[in-house]
Amino acid sequence: MTISKATSFLWKILLILIFLRPFISEHAFLIVGFWYISILSFLLIFYLIISNDWALLSPALNFSALLFIIAILISIISSGSSGRSLLELYLFMPNILIFYIISRIKPEQRKQLIATIFFAASIISIYAIYQYFIGFRHTLDYIRQRCPNSYIEEFLSRKRAFATFTSPNIFVSYILMMVFLGMGFLTSIHRKEKTIYWICIFIMAVSLLLTKSLGGILFFLITSILFILGSIFYLSPNLKTNKKINLKRTSLIIASLLFAFMLMAIFLLRQRIPQFINIKEPNNSIIQRFYYWKTSLKMIKDHPLTGIGWRKFGLLYEFYKPLSANISHYSHNVFLQIAAETGLLGLFSFLWLIFMFLKTGLRVIKDNKQEQALKIGLFIAACAFLLHNLIDLSFYFGQASFFWWIILGLFSNFSRDNA
């Protein structure tokens, strides 16, 4: 078997593992998750070796990812490496490895990758709808018998869809990216397949609604508007006059659908909205998030340079938190948690990574007209994930964040095409 055949065969294996990624939670299924991460990491490293392409620090987006990893390692060493930090780093490594691999793949592999990801997301969305209308009552009885007082019981009793993920909020981050990935991918497929893709996108939007996540729904509406504006700004000048009218008509249709989506969201959230408004409620999630953020700032103040150590937030939170705050392992703000755990060194490297992504993404969309709609969709998908992590924690869960790193890798890959 030649190197090229070996690479092609291994790529197909990786596609299967990428397809399975959102179905397997290493936090819910410890043994299965551990073996999955182990096999995935080994094959990703092996693929890097046999692909014989080691120019991994170019373009600049790749170099910024390396700086972020170095900052994480420095925080682990300076704070005294713990078993939890090393385990979490091990679970985090597939994200970085897949980023570097995707930054080197061929154009035909990009289409295979995106189709694989979208197909998996469609199945999970269908399952989330099934879960909401049929599966909850069976699962709730099982949880109450086997795991009473489990945190999952809260989601089940409130009928908040979470599909194969450990919480509705993590599922929201994942499905936010998948919706915009699908919207962008529509222009890259044959006309006969578009109807199927539109149906899948609709199913994803419905599953997002069924999470009853106020933050997720709000950011979906915001990023949808950004997607419409970006499509009009970048795509309109490249279309003929009659096509421009179609684009405006399509935008109007999407805007109408978003309005209907908002009305449905208000209906589904009618019982949760009063809880958000009631600031006297001790378990109000908005008030609790203020506690998390305030505590994060205290940690940053005490450990400004290299932080408290990668993924040690939950270990120290109970010593910093106000008396009325709940226990949490996450800051619910990716920037504050990175600053608390890896210090200003880690925060600046992460901000540099995001800056390079934004810079690279906008340049790729502007300079290369091929697959422009796909690139806009991917760009908005990555931005939606970041925006949602201003108030949530999915960056630390590979089921969702793995795909954010894939999108970053795709933009690094696109930038190589422009070079």
Image (tube, rainbow, N blue to C red):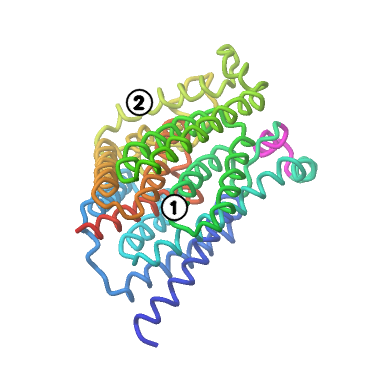
- Density class for disc 2 (Cα within 10 Å; few <14, some 14-19, many ≥20) is some
Classified by dominant secondary structure, the portion drawn in magenta counts as helix
Position of residue 137 measured from the top left corner of the image (x, y, whole percent): 79, 41
> Residue at the location (32% across, 37% down)?
233
- For marks 1 and 2, give the CA distance: 44 Å
Position of residue 59 measured from the top left corner of the image (x, y, whole percent): 21, 56
Q: How many marks?
A: 2
Q: Is residue 152 magenta?
A: yes
> Residue at the location (47% across, 58% down)?
189
Asked if residue 300 is positioned above or below residue 29 in the image, the reply reads above
Which type of secondary structure does the marked residue at label 2 adopt?
helix
The amino acid type found where label 2 is placed reads Leu
Which type of secondary structure does the marked residue at label 1 adopt?
helix
**Is residue 143 at least partly visible in the picture?**
no
Q: Nearer the viewer, residue 180 or 198?
A: 198
Position of residue 377 measured from the top left corner of the image (x, y, whole percent): 41, 45
Q: Which residue is mark 1?
A: 187
Q: Which residue is mark 2?
A: 297
> Residue at the location (77% across, 44% down)?
134
Q: Nearer the viewer, residue 391 or 364?
A: 364
Q: Nearer the viewer, residue 180 or 33?
A: 180
Q: Which span of residues is magenta-colored?
A: 147-157
Q: Residue furthest front?
A: 242
